[in-house]
Image (cartoon, helix red, strand yellow):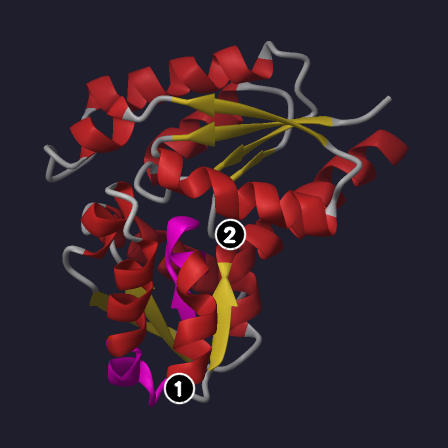
Amino acid sequence: MRPRIVLLHATPVAIEPILAAFRESWPEAEVVNLLDDGLTLDRAKEETLSRRMIDRFVALGKYASEMDASGILITCSAFGPAIDELAAAVSIPVLKPNEAMFEAALQQGKRIGMLATFGPSVPTMTEEFEQYAHAVGSNATLETVLVPDAIDLLRKGDSETHNRLVAAQAHELAQCDAIMLAHFSTSRAAEQVRDTVTNTILTAPHAAVEKMKALVTGAQKC
């Protein structure tokens, strides 16, 4: 029986990058998309993640768990505390979008850069990175550059300009040991970023698929 992985999306621009990663890295998985793009719209109106938004996110995640899912992969990085609550509420693996990418970044050095396009996600991602680094005994630091307007252009279908804007600011992190492209949607700019700087460039989708595969197949063997 094929393992069913529910992808929980808060924006449609995250869908294609993670589907491509599954096709390349784990085609045996049965992938189901669950989208509430109102989550991103409403999250952008809040400076901090409200109790109401957390409850709404967890409710959607519980629905995902009831779809005979073997695991849930979150593709939006602005809901860290809500993902933690969801993981505690269900019995299947729940993976944050950037957990595996953080792991890979810390293997590259102690000065890590991140290119982000969605401002509300930066505080939660920074906190998650620092928590993960502390948990593994690393004193790595994170420097983030926010690329304004890029995600709005991507939502309008202008991926070419989105990619160009992201790549244009990569030089601000050229001193870092590795540069992470913060969001699943940002991963589409990876080629242009690699053409701009010589740093190791990390993207979230492929790392997340490999980690989810390990979590699910490992649990099935037990």
Q: Amino acid at mark 1?
A: Val
| Residue interval drawn in magenta | 169-187
The residue pinned by badge 2 equals: 99
Point out residue 163 in the picture as x, y percentages from the top left corner: 33, 64
The residue lying toward the viewer, choosing from 171 and 47, is: 171
Q: Considering only vertical position in the picture, is 177 above or below 61?
A: below
Query: Image check: 180 left or right of 121?
Result: right
Tag in front: 2 or 1: 1
Secondary element under disc 2, as helix, strand or loop, is helix
> As drawn, is 1 to the left or to the right of 115?
right
In reply to whether residue 55 is colored magenta, the answer given is no
Q: Label 1's element?
A: loop
Q: Is residue 211 left or right of residue 120?
A: right
State whether residue 158 appears in this view.
yes
**Toward which corner of the image does residue 218 lie, by quadrant?**
top right
Q: Nearer the viewer, residue 146 or 220?
A: 146
Check if residue 186 falls in the magenta segment.
yes
Q: Report which residue position mark 1 lands on.
A: 197
Q: Residue 183: give x, y in percent of width and height.
A: 38, 52
**In the displayed structure image, the side of residue 48 where residue 63 appears, left or right:** right
Q: Label 2 amino acid?
A: Glu
Residue 180 sits in quarter: bottom left
Against 221, residue 147 (above or below) is below
Q: Is residue 180 above or below residue 195?
A: above
Q: Earlier in the sequence, mark 2 or mark 1?
A: 2
Q: Residue at horizontal 42%, vertical 26%?
A: 85
On the image, the x and y values in percent for residue 38 come to 25, 23
Q: Residue placed at 73% from the left, 43% from the top? A: 213
Residue 176, by quadrant, is bottom left
Query: Which quadrant holds the C terminus?
Result: top right
